[in-house]
Image (cartoon, grey):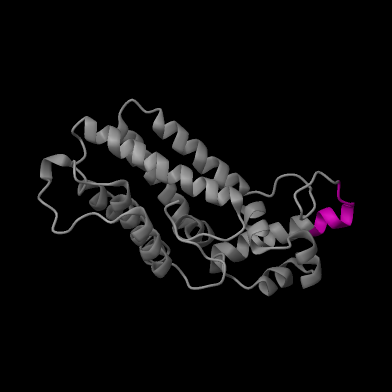
Amino acid sequence: MGTGGGGGARGGGGGDVPLRRDARRNRESLIAAARAVYAEQGVDAPLDDIARRAGVGNATLYRHFPTRGALVEAVFRDTLAGTRRAGEEARRSEDPWEGLTSYLELVFEGLAADRGANDLMTTGVEGAQSLEELRAHNRETVGILVRRAQERGTVRPDVTAEDLLFALAALGRAVPASAAVVPGSWRRFLALLLDGLRAEAARPLPAPPIGFGQLEEVLRELGPSMPGRRPAGR
């Protein structure tokens, strides 16, 4: 997963209006400060903390980024684009199991390195359209690869995309804490989770699969409670 980036100099509304040098400097400072604060605290960090770290007032922050979603998109633009590219590459893999595992390992590397990225992939932020599109793309990628792997007999036939997305979100929420105590331990947990998908070791599951609407509801409860949060899996 990428490190995130702010892209070109634009106004808060997203148009291509050139910014004055001081305004551009303020915007870049806000993006850098937000990236650092999100990595430490997650994307529900107070906007006051971001403005303070950037050395500007709240009015300046809101002038450049009228909503939390606008700031999140500016900070994580490169990250979102990189994850989408990784999903496309995984879909093109000749071996769907290899494509799935490689894709998820890359995603989890990002979750372990950046708490803000973790929040994006496991909950969400209202008003960040590119994030909504990425979650939809992620769900589609997982579904495609699971189905292809089932057709090859690699993945057990009773697993659904929602099963895997739920398990990944639950594990993902624990990754920052585990990484802080035992760096890299998420690789073991992810490997154990993925081994449970293999067809050769399958036993009957004790309950029916959940649907997409149920997955959304569960992940809403799982994620941090804050205004503007939406569930993962999209």
| Foreground residue among 90 and 159 | 159
Residue 212 percent coordinates (x, y): 36, 53
- Above/below status of 121 relative to 17: below
Residue 81 percent coordinates (x, y): 57, 42
| Magenta stretch: helix, strand or loop mostly | helix
Visible in this render: residue 17? yes
Residue 203 percent coordinates (x, y): 10, 49
Which residue is located at x 73 percent, y 63 percent? 66
**The stretch drawn in magenta includes residue 69:** no
- The mark total stands at 0
Q: Which residues are magenta?
A: 18-26
| Foreground residue among 140 and 195 | 140
| Foreground residue among 106 and 136 | 136
Judge from the rendering whether residue 98 lies leftward or rightward of residue 12; answer left or right: left
- Above/below status of 176 relative to 136: below
Judge from the rendering whether residue 176 lies leftward or rightward of residue 146; answer left or right: right
Q: Quadrant of residue 49?
A: bottom right
Residue sitting at the far top: 94
Residue 27 percent coordinates (x, y): 77, 57
Visible in this render: residue 3? no
Residue sitting at the far right: 20
Which residue is located at x 56 percent, y 64 percent? 43
